[in-house]
């Protein structure tokens, strides 16, 4: 499930955006100021940020510049400022798109999907050392030996591969791969599935080269061997 962070201090508008985007199949988190937004994005990296420019304290342009220096998160700025110089300032700060208020919700959803398509790689094939994975035909090999992967194992690998060098939280995998709307408590489904997957594709599952566990976080896929 695609995760969107809504950074908006207008609570009524934030609720409208949350309801509308949730109905479109997105998982939303709301932050009402810059500090809350930084905490939310650090706790669980979103797939896209809807970022109000006129925030109290640290404004949207400052947040946009910060995230451009530290992360490659797609950002759409929301603002009541309509002058050309304001739009240029937003784009120069690193925004991927710029939407002026008031806006049409259908157009906003279309812009979100367009930015996500540009930002997220579509992975059809993945190579991890001697292992090759063909996501289009759901086939995998280790050299010339066929690897028997389940549909869920293909889905886990593809989800991680489309978010390269990014920590993917366990809850995010439960949303995006298992399809749970809410994360079940005390489930080890993700850990068990990743453990089985490592046994099939890693040379030494206890010292993985490609699928790494991040303490307190989730999982990280790297395509190069770790030295």
Image (cartoon, rainbow, N blue to C red):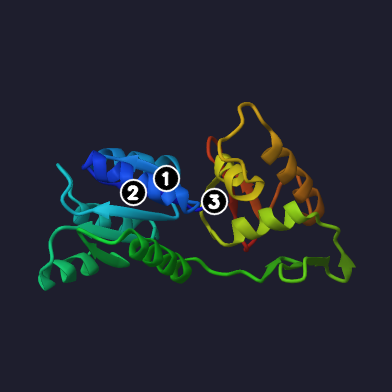
The image shows residue 198 at horizontal and vertical percentages of 75, 49
> Whole-Å distance between the Cαs marked 2 and 3?
17 Å
Q: Which residue is mark 1?
A: 28
Q: Is there a contact, CB below 8 Å, between mark 1 and mark 2?
A: yes
Residue at the image point whose x is 38% and y is 56% from the top: 71
> Whole-Å distance between the Cαs marked 1 and 2?
9 Å
Left/right placement of residue 75 relative to residue 85 reads right
| Mark nearer the N terminus (2 vs 3) | 3
The image shows residue 32 at horizontal and vertical percentages of 25, 39
Element at badge 2?
A: helix
Relative to residue 23, is residue 112 depicted above or below?
below
Residue at the image point whose x is 17% and y is 69% from the top: 87
Q: Which residue is mark 2?
A: 17
Q: Which residue is mark 3?
A: 1
Q: Is there a contact, CB below 8 Å, between mark 2 and mark 3?
A: no
Left/right placement of residue 139 relative to residue 97 reads right
**Front one among 198 and 56:** 56
| Mark nearer the N terminus (1 vs 2) | 2
Element at badge 1?
A: strand
The image shows residue 69 at horizontal and vertical percentages of 31, 58
Outermost top residue: 186
Query: Is residue 88 visible to the viewer in this orientation of the structure?
Result: yes
The image quadrant where one finds the C terminus is bottom right
Residue at the image point whose x is 72% and y is 65% from the top: 129
**Front one among 201 and 37:** 37
């Amino acid at each position: 499930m695609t995760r969107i962070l809504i950074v908006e201090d207008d609570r009524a508008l934030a609720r409208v955006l949350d309801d509308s985007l949730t109905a479109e199949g997105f998982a939303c988190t709301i932050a009402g100021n810059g500090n809350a937004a930084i905490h939310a994005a650090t706790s669980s990296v979103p797939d896209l940020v809807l970022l109000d420019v006129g925030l109290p304290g640290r404004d949207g342009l400052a947040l946009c510049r910060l995230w451009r220096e530290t992360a490659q998160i797609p950002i759409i700025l929301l603002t009541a400022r309509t002058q050309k110089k304001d739009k240029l300032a937003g784009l120069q700060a690193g925004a991927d798109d710029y939407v002026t208020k008031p806006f049409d919700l259908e157009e906003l959803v279309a812009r979100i999907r367009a930015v996500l398509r540009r930002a997220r790689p579509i992975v059809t094939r993945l190579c991890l050392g001697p292992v090759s994975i063909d996501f289009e035909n759901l086939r995998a090999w280790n050299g010339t030996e066929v690897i028997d992967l389940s549909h869920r194992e293909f889905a886990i690998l593809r989800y991680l591969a489309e978010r390269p060098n990014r920590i993917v939280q366990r809850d995010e995998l439960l949303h995006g791969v298992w399809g749970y709307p809410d994360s079940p408590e005390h489930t080890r489904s993700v850990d068990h599935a990743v453990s089985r997957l490592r046994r099939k594709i890693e040379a030494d599952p206890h010292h993985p080269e490609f699928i790494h566990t991040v303490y307190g976080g989730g999982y990280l896929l790297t395509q190069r061997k770790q030295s």
